[in-house]
Amino acid sequence: MNLRFLGMLASVIALSGCVHQLPAEPQPAVAYWTFDGDLIDRAGRGNDANAQKPQFVAGSRGQGLKCVQGPALVADSAELRLAPGLCVECWVKLDAPLPDGQAIVVKDGEYMLRVDPTGEGGNFAFFVYLEGWESRVRSTESPKVGEWYHLVARWDGNEISLAVNGDENRGPRTGVPAPTEQPLRLGFADGVIDELRIENAGATQSGVAHWSFDGDLRDNAGKGHDIAAEEARFVPGRCGQALRCDAEQVQVPSTPDLQLAPGLRIDCSVCFEQLPTDSRYIVIKDGEYQLRLNSQKEGGRFAFFVNLGGAWEPRVSSAERVKAGVWYRLIAKWDGLAVTLDVNGERERSVRSGSPRPGDSPLGIGVIDGLIDELRIENPRLPLLRVRDVAQERAILRAGRPEKLTAVIQNLGTEAEAVVARLELPPEVKNLGSSVHELGVMPPADTRTVEWTVQAEHEASVTANVRLTAQGCTPVTTRRTLAFFPSSDQPTALLAASAATSTPDGAGAVTYYVDSAAGNNANSGMSPDTPWLDFTNINGKTLGPGERLLLKRGSVINQELNVSACGTAENWAQIGAYGAGARPIIRRNWDIDERCVLVRNPDFLRISSLVVCYAAKGLVVYYQAGGHAGLVIDDCIAHHIEGLYRPNSHGIPEWRDRNGSVGDGLGSSAGIAIVGAHAKDLVMRNCEVFQDSWGFFVKGDAVTIDRVYCHDNYAHNTSPHPALVSARRSFLQNSIFDAPGWHAFAGTMGIMLCDPQGLIIRNCTFRNQPDSGSHDEGGIDFENMGNGCLIDHCTFQNNAGAAIEVLGLQVPQPRNVEIMNSRFIKNNTARKLGPSEIYIWGKQPNPEVCCSTGTIHDNGYVTNPGVEFFVNEAPQTTLWTLRDNTGYATVEELQKAMPFNDPPVVKAGPDIRAHSMTVRLAGSVIDDGKPGVGPLIVKWEVLEGPGAVTFQNDGAPETTAEFSVPGDYLLRLVGDDGELWLSDMVAVHILAPGVSVAKAWEFNAPLDKEGWTEVNPGTRVQEWLDQKWPCKSDPVKYVAGGYYILAIEGSPDAHLLSPDNLGVDLTANRTIKVRFQNHTPTTRMRCRFITDADAVWDDVKSKDFDVVANDNAPRDYAVDMSTVPAWTGRLRQFRLDLATGEPLTGTCRVDYIWIDSSKAPPVEARP
């Protein structure tokens, strides 16, 4: 295995582990978990584990642990760190095959036990990290599903061993461990772990003070920090006894080893018998540091502060509110760069650097109305070397030319001697000079600058290491991604995808067919004449080279597709469509726990021509481990994928406390997602995403997002933005973002970029991000970190917020950003941040956070009154250069000076209701004639409908369409100029003979209720603050995606009220037709009305009708009002009573409401 890959794997896989062979004479355990209904450390050392909804199932003895929602965490301690004599023993059972491997127990950067991927043998394996992970030791055989295995692993300083059911394998392994402060992670989803025991005789306890509070106040570290306090009270604690802190604060006189310095670490356990309303100090040294419980007004969370330069903020706070009666293990640290706070293994971090001011104030152990146990302070007061930055001369690195790297080296601790800075590069990148710089002595607060010149001959994403060494110090390594693009900007992944071929007739290659109308799962599924009905027979399988899964056009399948693929570069696997007609649709039940497609760990797979809709997750590709390559998602549509953002943020009562489908590493409702470990050569092109919470969520190396239309994502409460995360050497090009987000607690943007490492955004449009009262609401959001980003030839227009934001907030901002040759047209209409077109955040100008650098040049702009082109709130700590940017008085002047290719203007025409089976379509496509590389392409297609549609000329915007049966259809019109494309849709209703519609409300325009109002839904704004990602949910009562959506909670009188003064002749129009989804438990609703002659609401003017409770899809309801004697004269107003007297909770989604002349047929299900 490649060592670099293994190091990456340790940080990516959520679970890993290491077992250690027991010696003949067992040592006392430093941790022991039986998992018999809890996660308590039976060794009595306080190393209790914590997990999200752990499952305790049948174990090897008693119960065992199964972790479905992520591993259990054990806070770091010295006795759990890698040292000679480490021994780990456990029992493990697999519940399913693990072709991609599975971590079992891990302490990142120290040791891990896992099941290796099948490609590496699929055996149990044990690793210790000694300047690298290899060499490992493996079991003799691979584990089998359903069998228990006894694992014992050990590292004694010279040898590593792993015994499985007594069969032991050994190997030499020497080196010096570098302990980390990472938590221990244990347990996994696809199996059970039991009787986990860790011994570590060689572990050394460090610290300048340690109070165990076992009946006295002695300093067990032997450093003389005994506490003199009268009437101290000791009670049973987490480990032995604890100090009751409800009287006076106990104090320890100040000494240099208790004063604030980089490396300070406070470790203790606390329990509050009742929660105070004000702040309570657990540990405090006035003017230097404090660990406390914030007041309830401030959130009631733990917080850790250090005083630097006379300032206490920013602090770091725990994610969740503290609860009474619960023991919490707290580890607070300042390393000179950041403050961290671990609470039961969950770590929060805030960047924090500066100069401490040591003082003589005593150390106080506070009055907290609770218990403190096992308080330990470490304060090594050593040199603290770090690489503050590795800057590149240009935003985009190019293969074939020299590139200069500049590193800033700092010493934040005591004096360091014999300091050396070394650049370590992989073979594919050359250092054109010396790789080593000898820096000699570095006094405290010293800063040095070193330079290297490197060159890559071919495009690549590589990891460069800057390694710092000094006499008597542990080496420090800073890793930096270098993304070398080709000399031309044509994405290599896109070229490879265009050339990708498959040979389905190759040896052993099979094509599978699915037809939801004519299929049968008893068929072979291997020809169009013998298709399967659904995915039952294909789920869980892996498509091999050249193999295809084809879905019949016109199929609508309500089932999750769950497959993998193992194609080759010469012979790709495929998932796509066959036949003629509408694209195949994977349509679920509009539920938060449902997903449309999950593809795990594919290699060289093409997915095309699918529609995924009405679920919480759309098309998800999930990589469980790195090393995979080759994915094309082409010409797919994802819509109505919504609900997952922050827990309970959605505002849908029946979805409360539900977190979505599991097993894909995705916590968001993305229409299309590529997530998990980093894979490479990933392409998403020609796709459309709308009415999704997150249009897309993509992560990977050599990603190309090309010609994507992301628009109208109006999912209230849960639609922040599409996201591009940790993309390396990637392209986003030729794409349109038009209202790509709408409303979310933490803000909305056109796209969120997280840690991009080499990203080119070119020829994209970001426009019309609406104002929902959310934060931000702009175009591009540089959310955090990143390096080397180019924004070129883009248009930003009419966004409610800034066109581009560089945030950071608590983590470093991106460096080396170039914004050039782009148009900025009247953004920040809601006067958000800045207010400006380009905004650099700096409200708390921490130099470790506000550290962005960039160049902004050769752009044109037209601003709204009061909006500036550029605002930098942190000019002292950031470095931005502006040159040759031009302001214009009018949009027309800007467009003349910068005549970009604008996307075609596509209109499918107004909604149609017709009796004839042949309908004239009045579409239009207007184009500016650019880029002039080919003719304008126009294309009609049917997306949904009960029958076939034949277009007289599907390449003309104005044409006729023939419908095979009456019903409701959705048609899509596309205009494509060869570079950019847009689409629009039109609803067509083919009416039954003799039916006329007097009044209709279609709800097809976002946020337009067409005069209707909701009354008494019972919902309210709710806050969800006691969770890791706090949020609030607003009442759901809006129009989007073609539906009027109303959430109801506990209301006996919830109803929808029509506009007034309708003036409909009731003699000729006797039916109220409603198409909607009733996702409530009621089985009966009511239509009420008033007339011009009788304007009193009463039961005489009403009619009840039956509905399907908790329905999974919209359904047609026709209510014949002619049987109501009062249905005469002219209709003034009517209402739809969703609740009829009993409290009702649920959600209704109304597609349309008509008043027509038809005779009401029986209720018919038509999803």
Image: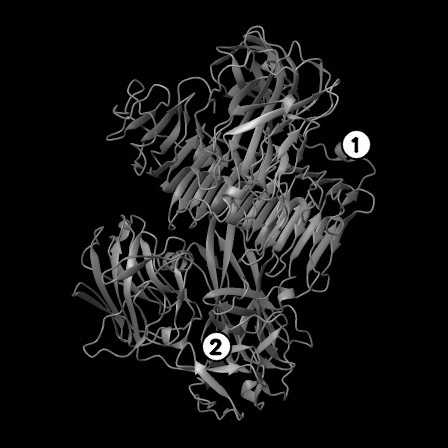
- Separation of residues labelled 2 and 1 (CA atoms): 65 Å
Location of residue 833 in the rendering, given as x and y in whole percent from the top left corner: 72, 51
Which badge, 2 or 1, is on the more N-terminal residue? 2
- Residue 557 falls left or right of residue 261: left
Q: Quadrant of residue 33?
A: bottom left
Location of residue 164 in the rendering, given as x and y in whole percent from the top left corner: 20, 63
Location of residue 665 in the rendering, given as x and y in whole percent from the top left corner: 43, 49
- The N terminus: image quadrant: bottom left
Mark nearest the camera among 2 and 1 is 2
Q: Quadrant of residue 898?
A: top right
In this view, 141 is above or below 640: below
Helix, strand or loop for disc 2: strand
Location of residue 1102 in the rendering, given as x and y in whole percent from the top left corner: 62, 23
Q: Are marks 2 and 1 in contact (CB under 8 Å)?
A: no
Q: 734 or 671: which is nearer to us?
A: 671
Q: To which residue does mark 2 refer? A: 268
Identity of the residue furthest to the left in this view: 167
Q: 1124 or 744: which is nearer to us?
A: 1124
Task: Name the amino acid type tagged 2.
Answer: Cys
Q: To which residue does mark 1 refer? A: 892
Q: Please tell me how crowded label 2 is: few (under 14), some (14-19), or many (20+) other residues with Cα within 10 Å.
A: many
